[in-house]
Image (cartoon, grey):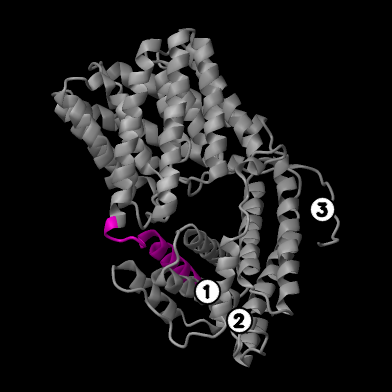
Amino acid sequence: MSSAPPSPIRPVRVRRLPLAGVLRPGSPSDIWFKPASSVVVATAIPNLTLLAVGRLDLVMYAMAGGFCALYAHNLPYAARARALAWVVLGMAASIGVALVTASLTGAAVVLVAVGAVLAAAQKTLCDATRIGPPGHLIFTFISSASLFAPQSLGQVPGHLALTLAGGAVAWLVCMAPALLRPHGPERRATARALGAAAAYADAARADATGPATERARAAAAGAVHAAWQSLLAAGARGAARRALERLVVRAEEALAVPAAADTAELRGWAAGLRGTGAVPRPRGVRQGERDELLGVDVELAGPRTPLWRRLAPGSPLLPIALRTAVGCALAGYASLALGIGRPYWALVTAASLYQANVTLTWNRGVQRVVGNLVGVLAFAAVAPFAHLGHAELIVSCLVLAFCAEALMGRNYWLGTVCVTPMALLVTEFARFQQPGELIVDRVVDTLVGALLGILAAVAVTNRRAGDQIERALAAATLATERAEALLAGTEPLEPARRRLTAALVDLRAAADAAAGEWWQRALPEQRVVDAERAGHRTLAATVRRQSGENGQGTRPRAGIADAWEGARA
């Protein structure tokens, strides 16, 4: 491990919270339509069933299960089946705690406290499991609303049964595409890796040392790492999956030696993966790929990191959990003090803000406020149609749910414009209410929740962010040294290479998270840059060994080696 001393403690400095670009729309996800269409189908089935039997007062519990269809669309189907099952169980557990609490006490002070603790637990578990968007927010929205719903203990089992039934429908809806395209998620992940590697190669040739190139390299490393994670979670390794593994190896080679990459070929393979045809096969398959695929077998047989290690004392997730608990409690109690009838709206607003650092939390706060303010205007426009009848109410919610997912990937505030009226309409399944009263309450709770949520993020400092960089630096250094030690032998390099890639991705994430903290000591920026360069040099060396004529240490083609040395200069 590196013997470099820890960075000296320097005076803390306050970082500016930005406004420029916070509301700028970006590019949507390439699979935005999958969660959008899935949630529509998964919620339409129980909603229409309850409409037919005249029990729309129970829609919230069934929709809670249906909203589980928003999760895990990036995972291979084998892993998706397991993840969605845990999501449904987590949703049921959250609602169960909320309903039992609501049935035992009507004290709003207690309900807000339970809601804040639930929000912090949901945030921590979603981050620890890396379940992905929409993260903890759906859990917090449903459980917080359930806390303030009139309830008796005898009703709890039936309401939980509705949630589980809705979750079962969501599970089936999300798994159904496997019948038509069983390797779809892995193909998309591989295509992203190939495209990102090609973009990095182009950027490196245009400006080898510029900030745009560094961003492209980080994005490519993340995409390659995500592709390997997808393939390693995909279950049985058939011919199609092995072909995808070879393509990810080629993306990894382009990441390590961008000057020697054929970007047109990389993009051609990526385009070929977008459809339903056969997986493209690279020309001139190298003998060293046998070692690479053997390395996949070795990695699959290795141990997995248990979840409890991510939650152990010292985890970087714990300060964010504390921020969530404090911010949600402050927002809920402030709403109670103002006499608002729905303090859970302020609580959910605060819970929605918390990101990896204060800067991102601030950005999300601005986006949330703007989206909610525009969203209440959208509610005022939609309410007359939705109030025509229960069928119109259901149709309005389904359309808004689809639009929310369609816009969320472009910018959070755009998606919130649709989420806000949908959340307001959900409260009207039991009975129609006055739009003006709902709008005023929502605006006040939004402002209270956003203000106190951001104040909590600033007040609860995350001094572990710098420590996390030190741990990430140590892990990257160790992974580099292990990969270098294997270069002289004949053991498979792939497990060590993927561990090194993962360590570099984690290092970049830790550095970005710490850089966005509002109150933080000076960061070891030069050491991070040095560790990243050393890691990528080692990655290039592993590529050169694998690219040898026999895959076991033969000297690489001079063009590749010279290209890498030129890129370093």
Q: Nearest the camera: 478 or 116?
A: 478
Residue 152 x/y as whole percent = 38, 10
Q: Is residue 507 left or right of residue 186?
A: right
Task: Residue at 33%, 67% (x, y): give it.
Answer: 274
Mark 3: few/some/many CA within 10 Å (<14, 14-19, 20+): few
Of helix, strand and loop, which one carries label 2? Answer: helix
Q: Nearest the camera: 542 or 232?
A: 232
Residue at mark 3: 7
**Sequence-wise first label, 3 or 1:** 3
Alpha carbons under labels 2 and 1: distance apart: 10 Å
Quadrant in the picture for residue 441: top left
**128 is higher (above) or lower (below) than 241:** above
**6 is higher (above) or lower (below) than 401:** below
- Asked whether 527 falls inside the magenta stretch, the response is no
**Sequence-wise first label, 2 or 3:** 3
Of helix, strand and loop, which one carries label 1? Answer: helix
Quadrant in the picture for residue 480: bottom right
Check residue 546 in the rendering and tell me which mark sits there, or answer none. 2
Alpha carbons under labels 3 and 1: distance apart: 35 Å
The range drawn in magenta is: 179-197
Of helix, strand and loop, which one carries label 3? Answer: loop
Check residue 249 in the rendering and tell me which mark sits there, or answer none. 1
Q: Verify CB contact (< 8 Å) between mark 2 and mark 1.
A: yes
Looking at the rendered structure, the kind of residue marked 2 is: Gln
